[in-house]
Amino acid sequence: MELLLFILPVFFALSVLLVPKQGVRAYGIIGSLVVLGVVIACMMQYNNNGTMYLFMQKPWFYGITLSFGYDGISLLMLLLTAVLVPLILVANFRNELAENRLFTSMVFFMQLGLIGVFVSMDGLWFYIFWEITLIPIFLISWWFGAPERKAALMKFFIYTFVGSLAMLAALIGIKVNSPTFYIEDLRTVVFTGKTACWLALGFFLAFAIKIPVFPFHTWQPDTYTKSPMAGTMLLSGIMLKMALYGMIRWMLPLFPEAIPCLQYPIIILATVGVVYAAIIAIRQKDMKRVFAFASMSHVGLIAAAIMTCNFDALSGSMVQILNHGLVAVGLFLAVEIIERRAGTRNLDELGGFAKQAPKFAFWFAALAFASVSVPLTSGFIGEFLMLKGLVGFDMVVGIIAGTTLILGAVYTFRAYQLSMYGPVTRDHFADLHWSELLVLALIVIAVVIFGVYPAAITDFVNPSIKVVLETLSTPSGL
């Protein structure tokens, strides 16, 4: 059954090219729901004891193995991917992209790459699928983005490609002393602290660019702004989560010897990014750029929490990964709704929409509260656990990172207030279409459910987190 995780996205990506134009919308949504069903089936059969379930493991050639599997962490990432793809397709139901065969095909090819990243237990396959994800998102943004997109997308491509080469070089550096690229074989290689630091930096560069961590973020605001809204949703909702996953699954377990020398610098860079991005977001007039910088601030906090190697912080980071993926898609959908109806994203030209579209105002407000992690939302428990871990690691760092709670409220409610209240700026602003209402409602309901019952996430991933932390306490698996 697990092989369907690879087969189905390829099948739907190719077969949608043959579907009549008027049937592309429904076909894409149905195909994505089928993939979601397979992921749920995998979760139901998984024995949640924290160990890795390998559904395929056999040698191939030149040290490359066909090693694929999942644990609780991987399954949560698969679930996030499988849930967000149909949500993104439904969110774009009224957009002309929804009936474009190439767009829908690229979405499924991107889903294939993401699934491969989350189930690959062989370093080279992890790298291959990591690179596969770059192609469809680049093409989606190139084909369907804003007219002035080319410079921003070339910067994005160069940044991510250079980072990927650094990760590949580090992988080859480990493989020199390992019989295969299988993760457990790679973990048996013993390094000096200095060598481990250099190799770990190869992985970190690739991950830091994708997250992005300050100062590797300069590609992000322009790429998010110039990409079509569906591309921005894919980038923010799912793609950057690959890097956070990579830190937990690959960087830390492969190089526990490097943690003492890299821990503080990475946490400080990520914390600087939290504050820097939040301050920049407050000053933005383009709503899309507001939430682009907001995304950078939120995921910077997750990256810092992961590097503490603290159980609570890692548990909170997994909750926040799920929360951010859902909320980011919802916020960018809200921006799309405003731009589609008002013809602009400039906050100086918006206002008064709450009077004309009360349903939209309600659900947008609910998303805003979820974004600032109020109690009874999943972001609250996620940020609480992450900040608890950061304060335990270093009080000053934890306090500085905690400013995200205040700054986040400022830029989020500023964007909401300026667009929803004040003088009416448009003669007509249509309320939510059923597809938009469905997506916003499902996201808010999910965020509240996981906020009221976060154990649904933490109980599922905590056994796997314990296993990861045990590998860090036994360098190179010895």
Image (spheres, grey):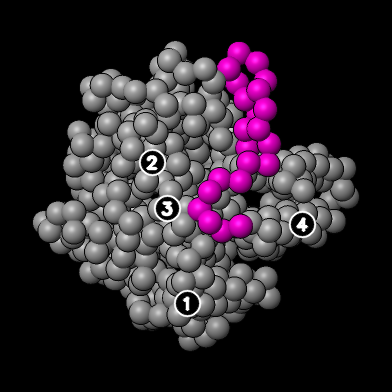
Question: Which quadrant holds residue 268?
Answer: top left
Which one is closest to the eye, mark 3 or mark 1?
A: 3
Give the residue type at disc 3.
Ile
Earlier-in-chain disc, 4 versus 3: 4
Q: Residue at x 37, y 65 (%)?
A: 382
The residue stretch that appears in magenta: 47-68
Q: Residue at x 67, y 20 (%)?
A: 60
Identify residue for label 2. 471
Please tell me the numbered disc located at residue 465. 3
Identify residue for label 4. 34
| Structural distance between the alpha carbons of marks 3 and 2 | 10 Å
| Structural distance between the alpha carbons of marks 1 and 2 | 29 Å
Up/down of 63 relative to 341, above or below = above
Q: Foreground: 57 or 156?
A: 57
Identify residue for label 1. 453
| Structural distance between the alpha carbons of marks 4 and 3 | 29 Å
